[in-house]
Image (cartoon, grey):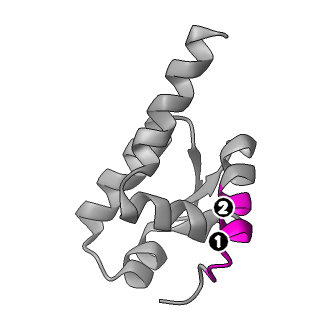
C-alpha cells in the first residue's frame, strides 16, 4: 500500500474528525458558500469558522475563490465527497436537520 496515500488520507480524516469541520464539509458538498453564511448557519464566530476553513483547505479538502468582497468555499476532494455521501446514505441521517 502506498504510504503517502495513507498519510494523506489519515490527515484528511483527522481534519474531518472535528464535528464543526464535518458539518462544514457536509454543508458544502453540493453548494459553495461564503464565510458569513457558514457562520450564520453554524451560529459560531467568524474567527472560529475561518480557523476551521483554513484547516480543511490546508488538507486539500476545500478550495476557495473570491467573489467581489467575499470568499466562497467549496469541496474539491471527490473521494471525501463520496465517502461522506456514502456515510449519510448508510446512516440514514438527514444532514440538513439539526
Q: Please tell me whether mark 2 sits on a helix, a strand or a loop.
A: helix
**78 with respect to 56 (left or right):** right
Residue 70 in view here: no
Residue 65, percent from left and from top: 60, 51
Please indicate whether residue 13 sits to the left or right of residue 87 in the image. Answer: left
Q: Where 35 falls versus 1 (above or below)? A: below
- Residue 6 counted in the magenta span: no
How far from the left and from the top, in percent, is residue 32? Answer: 65, 65
Which residue is at 34% across, 57% downward? 50
Q: Up-down: is 7 above or below 27?
A: above
Residue 91 numbered mark, or none = 1
Query: Is there CB contact under 8 Å for labels 2 and 1?
Result: yes
Q: Name the residue at 72% across, 41% down.
A: 79
Magenta range: 84-94
Cα separation between marks 2 and 1: 6 Å
Residue 6 coordinates in the image, percent (x, y): 56, 20
Residue 87 image label: 2
Q: What element carries label 1?
A: helix
How many badges with numbers are in the image?
2
Majority secondary structure in the magenta region: helix
Residue 25's disc is none
Q: Residue at x 38, y 43 (%)?
A: 55
Amino acid at each position: 500500500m502506498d504510504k503517502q496515500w495513507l498519510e494523506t488520507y489519515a490527515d484528511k480524516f483527522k481534519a474531518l474528525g472535528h464535528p464543526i469541520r464535518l458539518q462544514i464539509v457536509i454543508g458544502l458538498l453540493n453548494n459553495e458558500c461564503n464565510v458569513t453564511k457558514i457562520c450564520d448557519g453554524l451560529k459560531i464566530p467568524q474567527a472560529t469558522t475561518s480557523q476551521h476553513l483554513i484547516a480543511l483547505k490546508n488538507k486539500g479538502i476545500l478550495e476557495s475563490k473570491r467573489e467581489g468582497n467575499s470568499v466562497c468555499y467549496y469541496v474539491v476532494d471527490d473521494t471525501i465527497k463520496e465517502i461522506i455521501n456514502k456515510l449519510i446514505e448508510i446512516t440514514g441521517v438527514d444532514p440538513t436537520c439539526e
